[in-house]
Image (tube, rainbow, N blue to C red):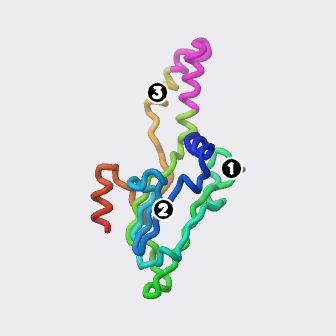
Amino acid sequence: MAALQVAQRIMPLEELLAADILEDRINIHLQCDNQNPILWASLSGRCLPKQSAWRLTTCDRFRDRQRNPGAPGHALSIVLMKDKEHLGEWETPFQLALQHPLMLKNYDELEDVMEALREDEEDRKRLAPEERRELQRRLQDWQEERFELMPGARLLPNSPELGFALREAS
């Protein structure tokens, strides 16, 4: 979250994100890093890229995942214009969707433990030894929990495997 705030001070969010729309697939990525997509998806039909569009908007659907639920919930809206031979409803929008892991569900838990330990470093008398040991145990046992991927999406492989996975999917 802090990284996003820093980036937004330098440039608008619209200049940070990109969505490449091709006839048979989309690639959502950071402007400077199209080799590591946030979402790469093979479409279930063909679209007309020049008549399709994407834009940033706001959405309340995931507002509860934000630190500040009163802030706007940013969302990327993609509208695809279907090719005339692929009109009608597609059973699913994507034949294959590879998605970057989503944000941590339990980041606040990690942050709280790390903050308590940091404060204790500054003032050794703040925590009793058993409290400090308990915080260290919690930090050692902490495991990341992430929000679920889109229905039907698969987790993007690590970078060395990514190029191979995308070539195989194309």
Q: Which of marks 3 and 1 is in front?
A: 1
Label 3, secondary structure: give it: helix
**Which of the marked residues, 3 or 1, is nearer the chain's N terminus?**
1
In the image, 169 versus 140, the foreground residue is 169
Label 1, secondary structure: give it: loop
Place of residue 139 in the rendered image (x, y in percent of width and height, measured from the top left):
48, 30
Specify few, some or many for label 1: CA neighbours under 10 Å numbering under 14, 14-19, or 20 or more.
Answer: few
**Label 1 sits on residue:** 69
Label 2, secondary structure: give it: loop
Residue 36 is inside the magenta segment: no
Q: Quadrant of the N terminus?
A: top right
User: Looking at the picture, which amino acid does disc 1 mark?
Assistant: Pro
Specify few, some or many for label 2: CA neighbours under 10 Å numbering under 14, 14-19, or 20 or more.
Answer: few
**Which of the marked residues, 3 or 2, is nearer the chain's N terminus?**
3
Depicted 47 relative to depicted 105: above or below: below
User: Looking at the picture, which amino acid does disc 2 mark?
Assistant: Met
**Which of the marked residues, 1 or 2, is nearer the chain's N terminus?**
1
**Label 2 sits on residue:** 150
Depicted 76 relative to depicted 158: above or below: below
Which range is magenta?
112-132
Place of residue 24 in the rendered image (x, y in percent of width and height, measured from the top left):
40, 74
User: Looking at the picture, which amino acid does disc 3 mark?
Assistant: Arg
Q: Residue at x 51, y 24 (%)?
A: 134
